[in-house]
């Protein structure tokens, strides 16, 4: 009887060891030791005294333990060749509106079993860039399938007055859920100037753009329904700080809410400088919080991505699976992948310290459509990774026609690329 108790204890110990997926490779010698204990503890009379039968039964028992007790064990080695997972994009997928510039989006499945997209838009009488800085709003669209097509439902975060930190522009949505609350992260900005009319000039060196850019901050809104109403905060969750790499602005939030409610938040930043355009090159920082409501603290006093750290990237999106945290982002100058404005893939164990995947190229501006054609997009940005049952299944992008460059496009919309299973 004592040998059976030893056997049961060994099986439980091996099951617990398997559950520590992040340590699975390092614990290989320990697992072999546990395996020997299982064989030694199992009554030999049940195995007819045959060494061969002992080995066969042993491997059968171990496979049962690892399959039933810890299915994640078999997922600890995941291919990081993200580019090979891209499937043809549906022509009729995503979201578009004729009278609006449409840009980055984020999607979540609701309790109604429909798919809810939160997406930036602003009227086309404004120039694409910098029109978004002064007059963007976050709209809500709905579809019956992840790939869409999505249909406009309502405006989730409209303008609410210049006196608010986010009163004139809401942009860059990222939607998550914590408990029974939908949590919408976004960039907000404001300016004190009158609304522009069609034909009014708007350039990057106008007071509108300079003030609106410098007022970019990150905030959250919450609701119990993707249809709203949304409770907005009177202050951003992540402000600037003098003499730091984020002294000029904080923008482009990329959050992940962990199972314990804590938050990893990657963000775009720029430091202040004395001459026009009064900002440095882009940096990516990381902040943490014990809860989505905050407080948020910048985790390290230096950028995690930038010209001196891997290379300049923009618009990161992050998620977590059995292998750890993942990041996709635009390679702003091509210094990482060798292809300007292609996508990079990076990985992390803690969401703070990152390294490039062994095959860092995640996507390019060349898109294969489901009608068999291929197209190099004018812009392909603001990637968002949609998960189903913890697995990345679709990529959403803001995209634009034309030869490249915001000033050369005539239409922008949101598109989707399905992914092969890993």
Image (cartoon, rainbow, N blue to C red):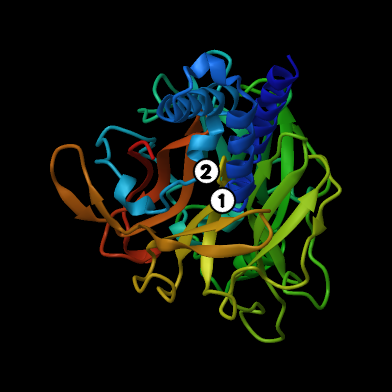
Horizontal and vertical percent position of residue 101: 43, 47
Q: In the picture provided, is 6 more to the left or to the right than 131?
A: right
Vertical arrangement, residue 302 with respect to residue 159, above or below = below
Disc sitting over residue 150 in the figure: none
Most distant residue in the bottom direction: 275
- Whether residue 417 is visible, yes or no, is yes
> Which quadrant would residue 358 be assigned to in this image?
bottom left
Q: Which residue occupies the foreground of this view, 31 or 320?
A: 31
Horizontal and vertical percent position of residue 104: 49, 47
Question: Badge 2: how crowded within 10 Å, few (<14), some, or many (20+)?
Answer: some
Vertical arrangement, residue 197 with respect to residue 139, above or below = below
Disc sitting over residue 76 in the figure: 2
Q: Secondary structure at mark 1?
A: loop
Residue picked out by circle 1: 25
Horizontal and vertical percent position of residue 51: 45, 30
Going from the N terminus, do you reach mark 2 or mark 1 first? 1
Most distant residue in the right direction: 295
> Which quadrant would residue 44 be assigned to in this image?
top right
Q: Secondary structure at mark 2?
A: loop
Tags 2 and 1 touching, CB below 8 Å: yes
Residue at position x 69%, y 59% in the image: 352
Horizontal and vertical percent position of residue 310: 54, 74
Residue at position x 41%, y 47% in the image: 397
Vertical arrangement, residue 254 with respect to residue 214, above or below = above
As measured in the structure, the alpha-carbon distance from the residue carrying label 2 to the one carrying label 1 is 9 Å
Vertical arrangement, residue 135 with respect to residue 310, above or below = above
């Amino acid at each position: 009887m004592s040998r059976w108790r030893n056997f049961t204890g060994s099986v439980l110990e091996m099951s617990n060891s398997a559950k520590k997926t992040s340590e699975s490779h390092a614990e290989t010698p320990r697992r072999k030791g546990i395996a020997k204990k299982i064989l030694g503890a199992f009554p030999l009379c049940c195995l007819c005294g045959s060494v061969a039968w002992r080995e066969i039964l042993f491997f059968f028992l171990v496979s049962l333990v690892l399959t039933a007790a810890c299915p994640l064990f078999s997922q600890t080695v995941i291919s990081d060749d993200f580019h090979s997972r891209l499937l043809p994009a549906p022509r009729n997928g995503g979201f578009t509106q004729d009278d609006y510039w449409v840009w980055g989006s984020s999607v979540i499945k609701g309790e109604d079993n429909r798919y809810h997209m939160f997406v930036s838009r602003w009227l086309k009488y404004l120039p694409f860039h910098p029109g978004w800085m002064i007059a963007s709003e976050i709209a809500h669209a709905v579809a019956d399938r992840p790939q869409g097509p999505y249909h406009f439902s309502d405006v989730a975060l409209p303008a609410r007055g210049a006196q608010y930190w986010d009163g004139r522009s809401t942009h860059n949505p990222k939607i998550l859920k914590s408990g029974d609350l939908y949590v919408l992260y976004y960039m907000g900005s404001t300016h004190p100037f009158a609304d522009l009319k069609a034909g009014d000039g708007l350039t990057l060196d106008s007071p509108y753009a300079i003030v609106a850019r410098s007022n970019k901050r990150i905030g959250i809104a919450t609701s119990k329904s993707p249809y709203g109403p949304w409770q907005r905060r009177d202050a951003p969750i992540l402000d600037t700080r003098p003499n730091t790499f984020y002294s000029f602005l904080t923008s482009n939030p990329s959050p992940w809410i962990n199972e314990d409610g804590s938050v990893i938040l990657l963000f775009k930043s720029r430091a202040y400088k004395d001459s026009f355009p009064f900002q440095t090159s882009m940096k990516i920082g990381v902040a943490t919080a014990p809860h989505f409501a905050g407080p948020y603290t910048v985790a390290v006093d230096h950028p995690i991505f930038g010209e001196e750290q891997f290379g300049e990237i923009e618009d990161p999106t992050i998620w977590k699976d059995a292998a750890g945290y993942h990041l996709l982002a635009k390679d702003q100058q091509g210094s990482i992948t060798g292809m300007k404005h292609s996508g990079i893939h990076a990985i992390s164990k803690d969401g703070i310290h990152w390294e490039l995947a062994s095959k860092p190229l995640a996507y390019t501006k060349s898109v294969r459509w489901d009608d068999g054609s291929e197209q190099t997009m004018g812009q392909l940005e603001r990637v968002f990774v949609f998960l189903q049952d913890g697995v990345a299944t679709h990529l959403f992008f803001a995209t634009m026609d034309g030869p490249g460059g915001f000033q050369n496009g005539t239409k922008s919309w949101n598109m989707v690329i399905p992914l092969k299973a890993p």
